[in-house]
Amino acid sequence: MTATIRSEIEAQFIQVAQEQGNRLAPLTDDLALLDSGLDSLCFAIIVARLEGLLGVDPFTLSDDVLFPVTFGDFVRLYENATK
Amino acid sequence: MRNVIVTGGSRGIGLGICRKLAAEGYRVIAIARTQNGQLAEAMREAEDRNPGSFQFVSFDLSAIDSIPDLVQTLHKGHGAIYGLVNNAGISFHGILSQMPTAQIEQLVRVNTTSPIVLTKYVVRTMMAGGGGRIVNIASIIASTGYSGLSVYGATKSSLTGFTRSLAREVGRMGITVNSVAPGFIDTDLTQSVQGEHRQKIEHRSALRRLAEIDDVANAVEFLLSERAKNITGTVLTVDAGNTA
């Protein structure tokens, strides 16, 4: 299940970068999202699509959730939210 | 059929918009607290002509915390949402210095916060789908003054400001956001303005008459259509030239 979530997230990052014409950095766990090549609108689209695919939006589950710093943090946030 | 949500779709301008959109081939989802005879009749007519084209969902739009669930249910039940018409609104006529604070808060909640939060959740599904149309029903009172409507005016100009910035935000996704600003239209909302006042408004209008519900519905239908694909972030005034 965990591997599936990671691969779904990776697929969305790649697809949205392509659609929006952004150059995506290699998706490693320590990649800072600010350096990923995606902007805030891209992340909004990714979060909206992941909600459709995984049935969860960790950012609306709680008001306390801060936007993750690295790609690894982003994946873990979804892994924890779908547990 | 493309799905369009119309808030406040059970009467007045909202019902007129629903009739028009159902007749033009959209699947309209009218949201309002309660059904009424007029709405039931319009739904029957639409059903005869085009089955499934006019749906009703009972919901109190001032229940802002329940809006995320509403949108999720609509999305699951009907599929992708193409259009959102934020039409629902309330109006209290009264001078500000005498208006109870609770009434001010209620106006802002129903006319400003609720459509913004509803748009937040609907626009997410549009972003995921790669396009859509949002139309906010403002009022000429957003840009002109009317004694006794200062809070109502504040909420309506909040919608035109919201329209402009959101249009910038979501344009890249193929989503358009526009406002329609009706002038004085005969509905339940405006029944407190009668007689002499009404005639004065009519006389002040360039066309010496009042705009009608159908005129507003036509404007909304146009903004939802392919013909308006390059129009976003603007206000379309429908007031028979009252503010010209």
Image (spheres, helix red, strand yellow):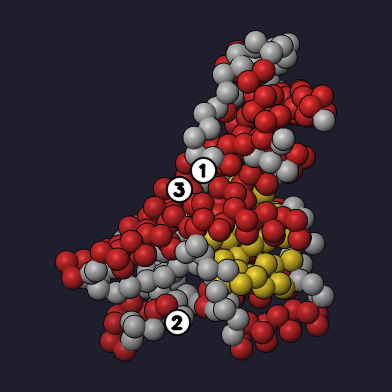
Tell me which chain the residue with mark 3 is part of: B
Q: Secondary structure at mark 2?
A: helix
Q: Nearer the viewer, residue B220 or A39?
A: A39
Q: Which residue is mark 2?
A: B188
Q: Which residue is mark 1?
A: B166
Quick check: can you spot residue A10? yes
Name the residue furthest left: B97
Seen in the picture, residue B154 relative to B8 is either above or below; the reply is above
x then y, percent, for residue A6: 77, 24
Q: Tell me whether circle 3 and circle 1 mark residues in contact (CB < 8 Å).
A: yes
Query: Do the residues marked 3 and 2 share a common chain?
Result: yes
Seen in the picture, residue A82 relative to B33 is either above or below; the reply is above
Q: Earlier in the sequence, mark 3 or mark 2?
A: 3
Q: Residue at x 68, y 46 (%)?
A: B125
- The local crowd at label 1, few if under 14, some if 14 to 19, many if 20 or more residues have their Cα within 10 Å, is many
Spatial CA span between label 3 and label 2: 26 Å
x then y, percent, for residue B200: 29, 80
Q: Which residue is mark 3?
A: B162
Q: Nearer the viewer, residue A74 or B167?
A: A74
Seen in the picture, residue B218 relative to B75 is either above or below; the reply is below
Q: Nearer the viewer, residue A30 or B213?
A: A30
- The local crowd at label 2, few if under 14, some if 14 to 19, many if 20 or more residues have their Cα within 10 Å, is few
Q: Callout 3, which amino acid? A: Phe
- Left or right, A5 with reference to A71: right
Tell me which chain the residue with mark 2 is part of: B
Q: Secondary structure at mark 1?
A: helix
Spatial CA span between label 2 and label 1: 30 Å
- Left or right, B192 with reference to B176: left
